[in-house]
Image (tube, grey):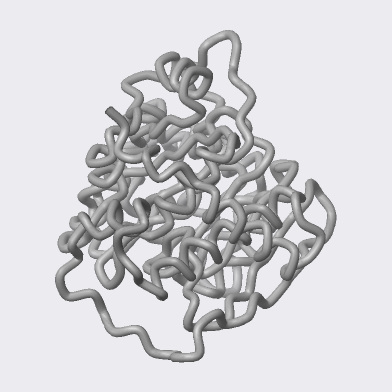
Amino acid sequence: MTAQTPHPFSRFVAILGRGKTKQRHLTFDEAYESMGMILRGEVLPEQLGAFLMLLRLKEEGPDEIAGFAAAAKSLYDLPENLPKVDIDWSSYAGKRIQLPWFVLSAMSLVNAGYSMTMHGTEGHTPGRLYTREIIEMFGLPIASSLTEAANQVRDEGFTYIPLEVLSPRLRELIDLRPIFGLRSPVHTFSRMLNPFNADTMMQGIFHRGFMDIHAGAAQTLGQPRMAVFRGEGGEIERRPNKPTPVWMTHGQDEPIIETWPQQLENGHQPPDEDMDTSRLLSVWQGKSDDPYAVASVIGTIAVTLRAMGKAGDIETAEAMAKEVWGSRDKGFLPRT
């Protein structure tokens, strides 16, 4: 019997599957090469499943996340002239307990003159309200190509880029979640995709233990500014009824870790049983008085301004955020 030549991808599976004493993290270069092979369709289905679940079991490391993101970015079909973007905002979790108040935070910043790319996906987990639905409700621009996204940023200061526009293959991988029964590393590194290289990258996560991983990946990638925190539902949304630890990075410098104070005295916020999306517009237009919503919106704006370097401390950032929210154009939404 002639021995078969090992598949080129098998070495990456072997690195991850050698057992607790011999397995290790992939290096940046190994992560870059392995994800490139996956995205180019050079991997067998059996290898893909084993690779993603071994990573999930081991838990991703910063260099792995950075290498995966860099590989995905290398395959973008980018236009020649990219617009200058201030903020990259990822949204991949979806909401099920509270409305996505962070969309009002993002739109306040856009209305204040900061340009933004927002990217995400939807439908991978049943029973969640995904950001794209709110973007459509508000009449905000959704890109069907990266060239269109670039033009939308130039013309309107904002674009929402569905994951399938960034990478159809990544969308297919995220959609495997119901088959695996678990999220895969794709959910983690998709947040790092920053298609137009915005100066500031915002990230919300669900698991507190991943903040150092995201911060480390941002350092490896040389991201000028990044903030990551455990947001409501795993989105970029400060929870006003709890203190919020925030990790911030500036290039390859060591992360700054700050604990932002609880904004509301009542530490309990019951789940929103109705999830009535019309309340988002009502709060934006000042027609509804919702202390939790307004505190969440202002708190999220504040963290973003601090991450951007617009404020030197928490107190200044929160004062600036109140001004941004208070001076918003209430007729800005919905767009017509």
152 on left or right of 246? left
**Outermost residue, top side:** 80
Residue 187: percent from left, percent from top: 41, 53
Residue 236 visible (yes or no): yes
Q: Is residue 258 above or below residue 156?
A: below
162 on left or right of 154? left
Residue displayed at 37% across by 53% down? 284
Depth check: give the residue in front, 216 or 46: 216
**Outermost residue, right side:** 253
- Find residue 148 and report its image quarter: top left
Quadrant of the drawing holding the N terminus? top left
Residue displayed at 53% across by 36% down? 116
Depth check: give the residue in front, 321 or 51: 321
Residue 193: percent from left, percent from top: 52, 39
Residue 227: percent from left, percent from top: 64, 57
Depth check: give the residue in front, 61 or 114: 114
Q: Is residue 161 above or below residue 263?
A: above
